[in-house]
Image (cartoon, helix red, strand yellow):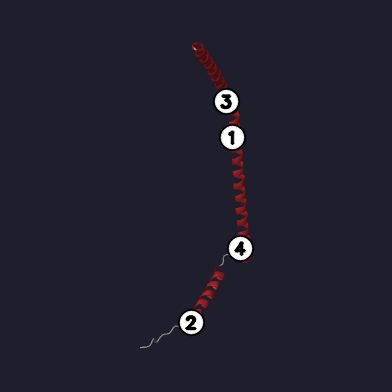
């Protein structure tokens, strides 16, 4: 038995085009604003977004500067302590070398006296 219904490809295209046209008509009927007002609205939104990005960038720069200043103050407060610790370390090394040299001399005298 042969298929009595054969779909017509032009019929599907016609239905698709009818849907596109009716969708466009409904969009135009229910559009909340004119093209000019829509462009103004979008422009205002873009300007607002730009202003918010600029404000966020400025806030980030301010926070970075505040962090840099805090780091500088902390380094200035710690620098004398670090310098003092370094000086004490150098002095301890010098005393250790002096003690080592005295020990070497004492050892040489002790070993040269035995012979």
Q: Which residue is mark 4?
A: 38
**Which quarter of the figure has residue 45?**
bottom right
The residues tagged by marks 3 and 2 sit, at their Cα atoms, a distance apart of: 90 Å
Q: Is residue 18 left or right of residue 47?
A: left
Q: Which residue is mark 1?
A: 71
Which residue: 59% across, 44% down?
A: 60
Q: Is residue 91 left or right of residue 3?
A: right
Q: Earlier in the sequence, mark 3 or mark 2?
A: 2
How would you rate the neighbour count of disc 4 (Cα within 10 Å): few for under 14, some for 14-19, many for 20 or more? few
20 lies above or below 105: below
Q: Earlier in the sequence, mark 2 or mark 1?
A: 2
Q: Residue furthest front?
A: 115
Which residue: 62% across, 45% down?
A: 58
Q: Which residue is mark 2?
A: 9
The residues tagged by marks 4 and 2 sit, at their Cα atoms, a distance apart of: 38 Å
Q: Which residue is mark 3?
A: 86
């Amino acid at each position: 038995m042969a298929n009595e219904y054969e779909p017509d490809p032009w019929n599907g295209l016609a239905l698709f085009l009818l849907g596109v046209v009716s969708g466009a008509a409904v969009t135009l009927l229910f559009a909340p604003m004119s093209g000019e007002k829509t462009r103004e609205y979008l422009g205002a939104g873009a300007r607002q977004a730009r202003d918010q990005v600029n404000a966020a960038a400025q806030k980030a720069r301010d926070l970075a500067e505040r962090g840099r200043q805090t780091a500088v103050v902390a380094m200035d407060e710690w620098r004398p302590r670090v310098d003092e610790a370094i000086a004490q370390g150098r002095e301890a090394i010098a005393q250790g070398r002096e003690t080592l040299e005295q020990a070497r001399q004492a050892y040489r005298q002790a070993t040269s006296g035995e012979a």
